[in-house]
Image (cartoon, helix red, strand yellow):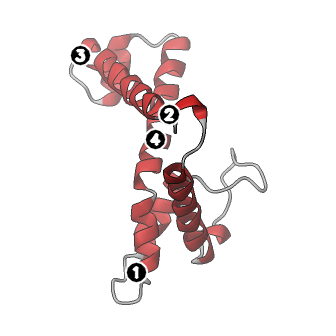
């Protein structure tokens, strides 16, 4: 984003590329996937789901449209952002419901409570870095 909060041409181009990738994957069949219980009717597919669809579609290397795979690759960064949001939400929910850091560490397969706390800090730092870029 440009100084003063204005959207730049680069931002608009990037957003258009992401929208095109989503359209490509939805037209390739992702739009017909069953909704999950937490999804509302008419809610767009998450980029994580679209990337997973692209990977699934790519299981047949000879019959897959390269545009579908390229669209999945284009959305990887956005899907990572979604997963970071999910992870931080789960970590906060776990702590809010009374799980201790040692319990969180065990659930994550980490060796210590400190490692679990550091993981949360890294996830939050990545989100902060992305916010600073915006």
Q: Are marks 4 and 2 in contact (CB under 8 Å)?
A: yes
Q: Is residue 133 left or right of residue 105?
A: right
**Residue beneath the point at 46% across and 23% down:** 91
Label 3, label 4: how many angstroms apart (C-alpha)? Answer: 25 Å
Q: Is residue 33 left or right of residue 105?
A: right
Label 1, label 3: how many angstroms apart (C-alpha)? Answer: 43 Å
Mark 2, secondary structure of its residue: helix
First reached walking from the N terminus: tag 1 or tag 3: 1
Image quadrant where residue 122 sits: top left
**Residue beneath the point at 41% across and 24% down:** 124
Mark 4, secondary structure of its residue: helix
Q: Residue furthest right?
A: 41
Mark 1, secondary structure of its residue: helix
**Residue beneath the point at 42% across and 45% down:** 80
- Between circles 2 and 3, the one closer to the viewer is 2
Counting from the top left corner in percent of width and height, residue 32 is at 66, 71
Mark 2 — residue?
A: 85
First reached walking from the N terminus: tag 2 or tag 1: 1
Mark 3 — residue?
A: 112
Mark 1 — residue?
A: 66
Image quadrant where residue 87 sits: top left
Q: Is residue 54 left or right of residue 23?
A: left
Mark 4 — residue?
A: 81
Counting from the top left corner in percent of width and height, residue 57 is at 45, 75
Q: Nearer the viewer, residue 122 or 110?
A: 122
Label 1, label 4: how many angstroms apart (C-alpha)? Answer: 24 Å
Which numbered marker is on residue 9?
none
């Amino acid at each position: 984003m440009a100084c003063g909060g204005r959207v730049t041409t680069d931002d608009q181009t990037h957003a258009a590329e992401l929208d095109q990738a989503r359209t490509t994957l939805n037209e390739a069949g992702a739009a017909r996937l069953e909704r999950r219980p937490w999804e509302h009717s008419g809610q767009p597919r998450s980029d994580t789901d679209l990337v997973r669809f692209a990977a699934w579609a790519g299981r047949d290397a000879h019959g897959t449209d390269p545009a579908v795979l390229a669209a999945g690759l284009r959305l990887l960064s956005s899907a990572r952002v979604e997963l970071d949001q999910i992870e931080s939400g789960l970590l906060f929910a776990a702590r809010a419901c009374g799980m201790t850091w040692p319990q969180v560490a065990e659930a994550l397969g980490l060796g210590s409570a400190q490692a679990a706390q550091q993981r949360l800090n890294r996830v939050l730092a990545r989100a902060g870095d992305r916010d600073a870029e915006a």
